[in-house]
Amino acid sequence: MAVQTLQSNKEDHALESVPSGERQNWLTLSWNTAGIATTLVQLFFGALITFVAGFQIAMLAGLFVTCVGALMGWLTGHVAYKTGLSSTVMARYFGFGNQGSVIASLIFSFMIIGFLALENALLYKGLIFYFGVEDTLVMKVIIYGILTVCWILLTAYGFALVSKVSSITLIAFLLVLVYMTARVMEQSTADVGTLMSFTSQFPADVLKSMGADSDLGKFIFAVNILIGSAGALALVDADIGRYAKSSSQIGIAALIGNIAMDVVMVGIGGVFMYAGVPALVEFYVAKGMAPDVAHKMVLESPDSIAAAFIVFGGVIGSLLMVLAQGKAQVLNTYSASLSLSNFFDATVGWRPGRVTFVILANIIGLVMLYGELLALVNAWITLLGVLTTCVSAIIICDFFFFADRSAALKQGVQSVNWAGVITTIVATVLAHYVLKAHLPVEFFTALVACLVLYPVLRAFVFRRPR
């Protein structure tokens, strides 16, 4: 019996509905939605958009994305609560069809494993900075090897262990983060009012090249950066929401996750780096770096976030860095394993067990570190946000307006729902290429295109089989 329970925990209903007896309350769900959103990458995004847009415009953008992201997260989470299925398995029944759901798996797994790789890279940079060791192949093998084994072991045993790890590390992370931010603010020559209202920190020519040379341009830049993570979080909300006891429970968890990501991380990331830039530049100059090079690196490199925690926090800062990354990596691996489970089942009918995909997700993440794939994730963050928005919007639209929800899970699954596939392609091309110059908030274009095009195609061209 104990062996069967352990095996069940490992599989964690990757391709089936979560039983009602395993459903959780909003607090348990929120450890995960907030845990995956509070990372060094999100702190860097916060620092970046506040330095481009200014603190107040960046916070307005964060509040706007919070509202949109929380609504999308709640709606996808509601579908997951009703069905008990993960995001990419839901796509089989609502919006894409059995083989068509491969598109959702490819989009989501590429993005979430990309975040897994990016977080690993930041943690690696921070660790070699802390220990003062050379960046060599041997150090890469040792550090990445240890990290990968940790993520696999902590993720392999299912949702219960993932939630427990996330709850403990999230509390510790937030306590240390508040302490660290207070310390940096105390050391800064700027008063609190200045820290909460600083304007753009980049030169005018740089802002113009980003399309952020006006207040509206700055707002749009900030929204486009944040919405990529919000789109991914909406699908994570579905992976978590399948464990919800009610629709309102996952709604609360989705809201908390988006507040943590788009308000808390943006605000703290901006204040932390603005107050800490002079000291960081001074630190690098003392090591022999030219002042202009040091200033450019601090402003533009994600590595500067990891360095800041170590420079200002020492052991405590290093602990924060590990806690921030550890909980997120477990959650990234968890969602990636669910997405890969659906991908291989839908394509070749391969079901080796979820633990295999936990391992595979980490292997793919390691491969990304040594190729151009990680650079593509960084370059395509806005495009990936558009794609994940399309997937979420189509699932929601199909579930609420076209599916016979009481019978959908009992009926045979359509092989490919071409209405969902075509809508995803057309909406993405319109948002990211055709209409970008006229409607620069790409997710909004994609969302409207999905909500207009999908109903037309589903109702009149590619109807659900009877």
Image (cartoon, grey):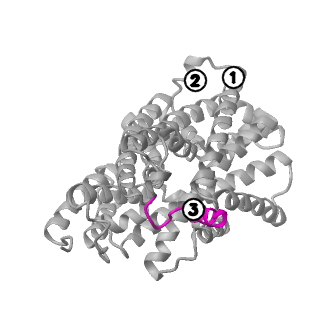
**Amino acid at circle 2:** Leu
**Amino acid at circle 3:** Ile
Q: Which residue is mark 3?
A: 113
Horizontal arrangement in the rendering, residue 288 relative to residue 409 (left or right): right
Q: Earlier in the sequence, mark 1 or mark 2?
A: 1
Q: Residues within 10 Å of mark 1 (few under 14, many from 20)?
A: some
Disc 2 secondary structure class = helix
Disc 1 secondary structure class = loop
Q: Position of residue 392 (x, y in %)?
A: 36, 56
Q: Residues within 10 Å of mark 2 (few under 14, many from 20)?
A: many
Q: Residue furthest front?
A: 1
The answer to whether one can see residue 202 in this image is no
The residue under the point 81% across, 37% down is 315
- As displayed, is residue 387 above or below residue 324? below
Horizontal arrangement in the rendering, residue 408 relative to residue 74 (left or right): left
Q: Position of residue 189 (x, y in %)?
A: 68, 19
In depth, the one of 192 and 36 nearer the eye is 36
Q: Which residue is mark 2?
A: 195
Q: Earlier in the sequence, mark 3 or mark 1?
A: 3
In depth, the one of 178 and 240 nearer the eye is 240
Q: Which residue is mark 1?
A: 188
Q: Are marks 1 and 2 in contact (CB under 8 Å)?
A: yes
**Amino acid at circle 1:** Ser
Q: Residues within 10 Å of mark 3 (few under 14, many from 20)?
A: many
Looking at the rendering, the stretch of residues picked out in magenta corresponds to 1-18
